[in-house]
Image: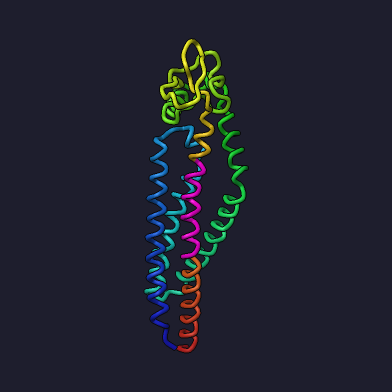
Amino acid sequence: MAVNKCIKYSLFLFNLLFWISGCIILGVSIYLKVSKNGNVILDQAVPFVDLLIAVGVIIMVLGFLGCCGAIKENRCMLILFFIGLLLIFILLLIAGILGAVGEKKSQVWVKESLAKLLPLRDQKPEVQTDIQKLEVEAKCCGLINGPSDWGSTVPSSCNCVDTAQVCQSAGGRQVYTTPCVTFVISFVEKHAIIALGIAFGIAVLMLFGMAFAMTLYCQIGKRDANTT
């Protein structure tokens, strides 16, 4: 019994697409990490980017493994590829469900993470610098409660330079009243949507990959059985 060439090369093609998708995930993840500009506040609020980088690398390795298994008709490589895909598929499914139903919980988690940095005046100078950069970029002040997070000394990064924003008087000058947690939550939600979209696309691709891998695995087994 010969191995179906259509199945064999279809699996190779899907693994090639799978490997490319791993490259895309890795590239997007690195972009998301770079887009945070090394800001410790955003790093703390969006830790899943490092996980996406790891997933991208794993998918690239599995894609390469599947390509080799298909071309060489190696059952060991194929079954390892299938198990790897199944595990990642389950993890993506769980992550997708948790991400879809846990939006409110993620907001609470972000607020709790940022609240640990209060009071801001007691933070290290480099952390205060990152917070002030975030305030200038997002046109906000403080992390949770507004200017009061800084205590009696509100930094110049809170100065209200955009009259379209809501401001208040503090120390004889106008400062932003909106806390930065609003911007951080929006940042997390936007990037979570990107991550969920990528995860859904990869999950669909995995189903085809698992089906082709198991079909080819069974055909190779029947061929070897008939040969012996």
Residue 13 vs 149, above or below: the answer is: below
Please name whichever residue, 72 or 12, is drawn nearer the observer in this view of the structure.
12
Q: Quadrant of residue 227?
A: bottom left
What residue is at 50 percent from the left and 53 percent from the top?
Answer: 196
**Residue 100 image position (x, y, % from top left):** 58, 51
Q: Which residue of the protein is positioned furthest toward the top in this rendering?
A: 172
Please name whichever residue, 111 or 86, is drawn nearer the observer in this view of the structure.
111
Quadrant (top left/top right/bottom left/bottom right) for the N terminus: bottom left
**Residue 64 image position (x, y, % from top left):** 39, 64
**Residue 157 image position (x, y, % from top left):** 43, 21
Q: Is residue 2 a member of the stretch shown in magenta?
A: no
Please name whichever residue, 212 or 187, is drawn nearer the observer in this view of the structure.
187
Q: How is the image coloured?
A: rainbow
Residue 57 vs 165, above or below: the answer is: below
What residue is at 48 percent from the left and 39 percent from the top?
Answer: 187
Is residue 155 rendered to the left or right of residue 107?
left
Q: Which residue of the protein is positioned furthest toward the front in this rendering?
A: 164
Residue 20 vs 178, above or below: the answer is: below
Q: Which residues are magenta?
A: 188-205
Q: Is residue 197 a member of the stretch shown in magenta?
A: yes
**How many numbered marks appear?**
0
What residue is at 49 percent from the left and 32 percent from the top?
Answer: 41
**Residue 56 image position (x, y, % from top left):** 43, 54
Q: Quadrant of residue 111?
A: top right
Q: Main secondary structure of the magenta part?
A: helix
What residue is at 42 percent from the left and 26 percent from the top?
Answer: 136
